[in-house]
Amino acid sequence: MSNKIVVLGSLNVDTILQVDHFPSPGETLSLKNKQTAGGGKGANQAIAAARSKAETSFIGKIGQDENGQFMLKQLVDSGVSTDFVSQALDTGTGQAFVMLEKSGENRILIYGGANAELNEKDIEKAMSKINEADFLVAQLETPVETTLKAFELAKKAGALTILNPAPAIKNLSVELLKLTDIITPNETEAEILTGIPVIDNDSMARAAQKLHDLGIKIVIITLGERGVYFDTENDSGIVPAYKVNAVDTTAAGDTFLGAFSSEIHPALDNLVDAISYGNKASSLAVQKMGAQPSIPARDEIIR
């Protein structure tokens, strides 16, 4: 039986600028290529979950523009329910500008747009879906107070909450962290959250314990090409990544989280297998260009 997942988050149209190397201050470069694709951490994660056969619904906001219609189509075409994607009246759909080096590394600038207008009323309108959900997934590209409201309602409904604390925020709401069951920072985000530089197993364990002290059951720290560190009350370890030739890492973390959320049991009794599945999905995604176009389907991951 597939998981029922509600993703609360951002919808961005990505403009991808391919360069040989990132420019130094004052340097002018010619682009190797320029393309547009669907993106936004929330939309990426929802599409990754849906392509892995989870029953996925989205709560988000777009502008009354062509970019908004484009993003709706990306969700619908991947099987994501958009019943609770609303429109902002005076603000455009979010955008991201991705500078992509030939090594596969990227630097990203975000224009929040309509994402910043997602509010508590939008959450309340989606209560019918939240009440049915196994998991509620959120990131930090929409207002924190809106996510806090969603997590409060999800906990009351019996859903488990997954927070991807990206982009990282210093002094993130302790109330939000206390309502989080699973948290998935990368190394930099883990340091910003805990104040502990994450450089080895010992520091990862100390950072994880600081998050456990807030009541978070499962801490997952993504380590890029090294894999994923996990820490629970009873177990910890690293699930290795799959070695591939990365050409674009833009949606690697989002693909991991969406695939992971589709695979993890609500009883949380298959954590390592779910992480390994997420790693497989991510390893496929980084071998293709673009955020959403690169996200694999379940059949491809299993194969």
Image (tube, rainbow, N blue to C red):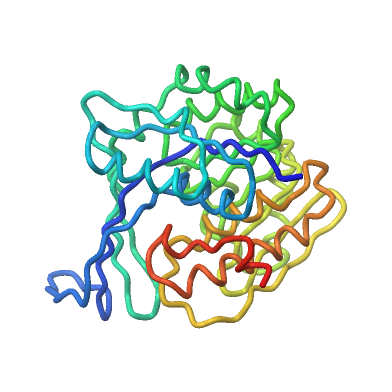
> Left or right: 167 with respect to 204?
left
Screen quadrant of the C terminus? bottom right
Screen quadrant of the N terminus? top right
Residue at 18% over, 69% down: 25
- Total numbered badges shown on the rendered structure: 0
Residue 61 place in picture, x, y as percent: 37, 32
- Above or below residue 74? Residue 16 is below
Residue at 31% over, 33% down: 114
Foreground: 177 or 59?
59
Q: Quadrant of residue 235?
A: bottom right
Residue 139 place in picture, x, y as percent: 51, 42
Foreground: 166 or 136?
136
Foreground: 20 or 52?
52
Kindly tell me whether residue 168 is visible in this rendering. yes
Residue 46 place in picture, x, y as percent: 52, 46
Kindly tell me whether residue 167 is visible in this rendering. no
> Left or right: 199 with respect to 188?
right
Foreground: 250 or 182?
250
- Above or below residue 282? Residue 103 is below
- Which residue is farthest right? 234
Residue 262 place in picture, x, y as percent: 66, 50
Residue at 74% over, 26% down: 158
Q: Quadrant of residue 107?
A: bottom left
Residue at 34% over, 46% down: 12
> Left or right: 254 with respect to 240?
left
